[in-house]
Image (cartoon, rainbow, N blue to C red):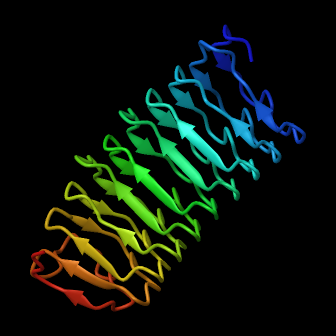
Amino acid sequence: IPEGVMSLKEAVFSGCGSLTTVVFEENSALYTIQDRVFEECRNLQNIEIPNSVTSIGNRAFFNCRNLTTITIPKKVVGIGIEAFSDCVGLKEVIFEEGSKLTSICQSTFKGCQKLKKIIIPSGVKEIDKLAFFMCSNLEEVIFEEDSQLTIINTQAFQGCTSLENISLPNTLTNIGNSAFNSCSSLTKIILSKNIKNIGKGVFNRCTNLTIYCEIESAIDSWNKDWNESNCPVVWNYNE
């Protein structure tokens, strides 16, 4: 793709089933990948997003089943809904150091079945609903130091049956309904005293989980069925 191209318009390569490699010329001026640009490019394997890109649209790489690794440039401030959803071969997502990303949108990595580890940039304040839904091989979620995360939304990590390690930042205040539903490999999670709202059934089917809470008991703003599965709870926890 020529260096002077500044925008890839909506659905421009959508459904190009034989496309395997995308190469951008050196000094690319590209700043946006619009909605559905590479949607259903099922054989796409190689693409290096230029450092100049600031936004990736909805479903931009939806169902790119043979894509195995992607690096998100640090200038990217927004990634759209379902941008990498159903990229079932995606094993590695790298956010460049100094990432300006502020949220992970709805269903962004939904169904990325081979993804094993994700490092969330410190500037991300919200992980929206279904963001990592059914990432069944995701084992570890790491938040960068000085994380600004405040919200993990509904079903964000539901069905992450291999998830073993996640240390929630102290900045977190809200956890949505079923956020960790069916995370059956999770054995420990710490809820800080800063968490003000917890939805219904957050830890349903977390059959091996013990919950450690820094407060003495559930507060009124937590849903009465927040621990619907009756996972063991250690109150007044101080690590």
In the image, farthest residue toward the top: 4
Q: Residue at x 64, y 14 (%)?
A: 26
Quadrant of the image for the C terminus? bottom left
Whole-percent x and y of residue 139?
48, 69
Q: Residue at x 48, y 83 (%)?
A: 184
Residue in the foreground of this view, choosing between 19 and 204: 19
- When asked about the image quadrant of residue 124, the answer is top left
Whole-percent x and y of residue 60?
67, 38
Residue 108 appears in the picture as rendered: no
Residue 110 appears in the picture as rendered: yes
Whole-percent x and y of residue 154?
44, 63
Residue in the foreground of this view, choosing between 92 and 86: 92
Q: Residue at x 64, y 32 (%)?
A: 48
Left or right: 108, with 4 as reference point: left
Quadrant of the image for the N terminus? top right
* For residue 218, above or below residue 24: below
* For residue 233, above or below residue 47: below
